[in-house]
């Protein structure tokens, strides 16, 4: 039976055993020549961990590595198997090396694999530290942004208060300017009224002199021969007319 075609299953209690169909089981039990060949159990030590495997005694150490890969996740090329203090090749069979039931095998990792694993752990630690630093930096930036926003809001509040104060002062100045305009406009009206009064006074002065316009009427009387006699004409009556006109001028 080809070892590549073997399937394995974990039994209750964590024991890893070979899965067989009826034909292979019958063939295995009879060893191909009718003899019964039961699987052997081996104990594998990997650091503090202990694994118990159930494999055919004619399996190779390479096959044992493939079984261990399913348990430990460690690739066969990174595994080293030792039996009785000697490292075993992948092509060597268990029964030829003297591995029997309940035998102990030591599993170790390749040094390069360990170094790589340590390097991976270190990289993971560095990544974790970098992530923590980045997170801390992000939190610091958030705090700085929040502080800047609070300061900006405070500055805006002060600016609004300053604008309100300026507006109040402008309103006061506007009221004063309006009062001054009233005074100035009132003064202008006073000056205009005074000017009108002066013009009227001047007109009165100029019109106080009489305008000479005397009309004399002379009547010539004729004497009639009517015997009535002559009548002396009445003395002329002086007629003097004075015209005075007062004019008002307005700007």
Image (cartoon, helix red, strand yellow):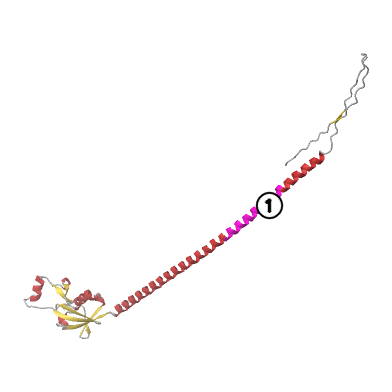
Q: Residue at x 75, y 45 (%)?
A: 195
Q: Position of residue 36 (x, y in %)?
A: 8, 78
Kindly indicate the quadrant of the structure image that contains residue 196.
top right
Residue 239 rendering spot, x and y as whole percentages? 86, 29
Q: Residue 1's quadrant in the figure? A: bottom left
Q: Main secondary structure of the magenta part?
A: helix
Residue at point 80%, 40% (across, down): 204
- The answer to which of 141 and 121 lies nearer the viewer is 141
The residue beneath circle 1 is 183
Q: Nearer the viewer, residue 77 or 166?
A: 166
The verdict on residue 51 being magenta is: no
Task: Write the residue at 33% across / 76% down.
Answer: 121
- Quick one: which residue is furthest to the left in this view? 34
Looking at this view, is 190 or 133 the one in front?
190
In this picture, which residue range is highlighted in magenta? 165-189
- Residue farthest toward the top in the current orientation of the protein: 226
Q: Position of residue 209 (x, y in %)?
A: 84, 38
Q: Residue most toward the bottom?
A: 85
Q: Check disc 1 and report its element: helix, strand or loop.
A: helix
184 relative to 225 in the view: left or right: left
């Amino acid at each position: 039976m080809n070892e590549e075609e073997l399937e394995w299953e974990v039994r209750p209690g964590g024991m890893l055993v070979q899965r067989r169909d009826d034909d292979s089981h019958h063939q295995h039990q009879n060893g191909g020549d009718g003899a019964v060949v039961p699987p052997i159990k081996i104990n594998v030590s990997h650091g503090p961990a202990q694994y118990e495997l159930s494999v055919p005694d004619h399996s190779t150490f390479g096959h044992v590595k493939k079984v261990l890969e399913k348990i430990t996740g460690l690739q066969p090329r990174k595994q080293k198997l030792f039996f009785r203090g000697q490292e075993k090749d992948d092509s060597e069979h268990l029964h030829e090396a003297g591995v029997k039931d309940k035998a102990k095998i030591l599993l170790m990792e390749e040094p390069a694999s360990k170094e790589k694993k340590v390097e991976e752990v270190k990289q993971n630690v560095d990544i974790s530290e970098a992530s923590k630093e980045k997170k801390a930096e992000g939190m610091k930036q958030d705090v700085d942004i929040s502080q800047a926003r609070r300061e900006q809001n405070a500055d805006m509040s002060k600016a609004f208060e300053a604008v309100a104060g300026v507006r109040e002062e402008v309103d006061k100045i506007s009221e004063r300017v309006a009062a001054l305009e009233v005074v100035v406009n009132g003064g202008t009206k006073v000056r205009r009224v005074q000017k009108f009064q002066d013009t009227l006074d001047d007109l009165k002065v100029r019109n106080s002199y009489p305008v000479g316009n005397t009309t004399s009427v002379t009547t010539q009387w004729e004497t009639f021969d009517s015997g009535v006699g002559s009548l002396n004409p009445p003395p002329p009556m002086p007629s003097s007319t004075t015209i005075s006109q007062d004019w008002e001028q307005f700007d």
